Each structure stands twice: as C-alpha cells, then as structure tokens.
Image: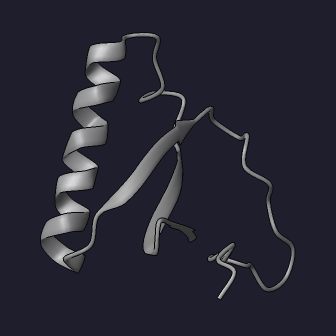
Amino acid sequence: MTREHSTDVLEIQVELSEQLFSDEIRGMEELQAKIQGELQAVLNISARLTFVEPKSLPRSEGKAQHVIDKRAL
C-alpha cells in the first residue's frame, strides 16, 4: 500500500505458476485485466497488479506478512 497524490494505491504482486507464466504478452495482459476486474467487482477497490516469475517471492517461515504499508501517514 502506497500513497500517491493523497490517494491510497494498492499494489499486488502475483506469483504465477510455471504453467501460467509465459512470454506471450497478450495472454498475460488479458489475465491481468481479468484479475483486476474481479478485484474491483468483489472488493470495490482498484489495484495495481504486477506478475512476477514463479518462485520469485520470498517464502515466509512462521507468521507471514501479507500487507506492507509504505504510506507516510
């Protein structure tokens, strides 16, 4: 979570499985739009979505930190 020009911005990193991760940009853009649309419909929030390579996000041991709030309130 960040703040840009007095607006909160939710940034989500999505780690794709090896089956879904590809070099085909059009397919990745369509998947990104679908996920963003679902988030908007279900949670009524917009989010900046970024795909990352399989197994690139750090794994946690014990209690996971799911939200990183970078806002300076």
Q: What residue lies at 41% left-to-right and 52% top-to-bottom? A: 48
How far across and down, in percent of the image, does residue 10 sit?
46, 66
Q: How is the image coloured?
A: one colour
Q: Quadrant of the C terminus?
A: bottom right
Name, please, the residue furthest toward the right: 61
* Residue 47 in view, yes or no: yes
Q: What residue lies at 19% left-to-right and 60% top-to-bottom? A: 38
Q: Is residue 12 left or right of residue 47?
A: right
Q: Is residue 38 above or below residue 61?
A: above
Q: What residue lies at 71% left-to-right and 41% top-to-bottom? A: 55
Q: Quadrant of residue 41?
A: bottom left
Name, please, the residue furthest toward the front: 5
Q: Quadrant of residue 68?
A: bottom right
How far across and down, in percent of the image, does residue 42 sit?
17, 75
Q: Quadrant of the N terminus?
A: bottom right
Report the number of discs.
0
Q: Is residue 43 above or below residue 26?
A: below
Along the viewing direction, whichever of 35 and 8 lies nearer the viewer: 8
Along the viewing direction, whichever of 24 and 33 lies nearer the viewer: 33
Q: Is residue 20 left or right of residue 39?
A: right
Q: Is residue 29 left or right of residue 12?
A: left
Name, please, the residue furthest toward the top: 23
Q: Is residue 15 above or below residue 26?
A: below
* Residue 16 in view, yes or no: no
How far across and down, in percent of the image, does residue 19 sit?
45, 27
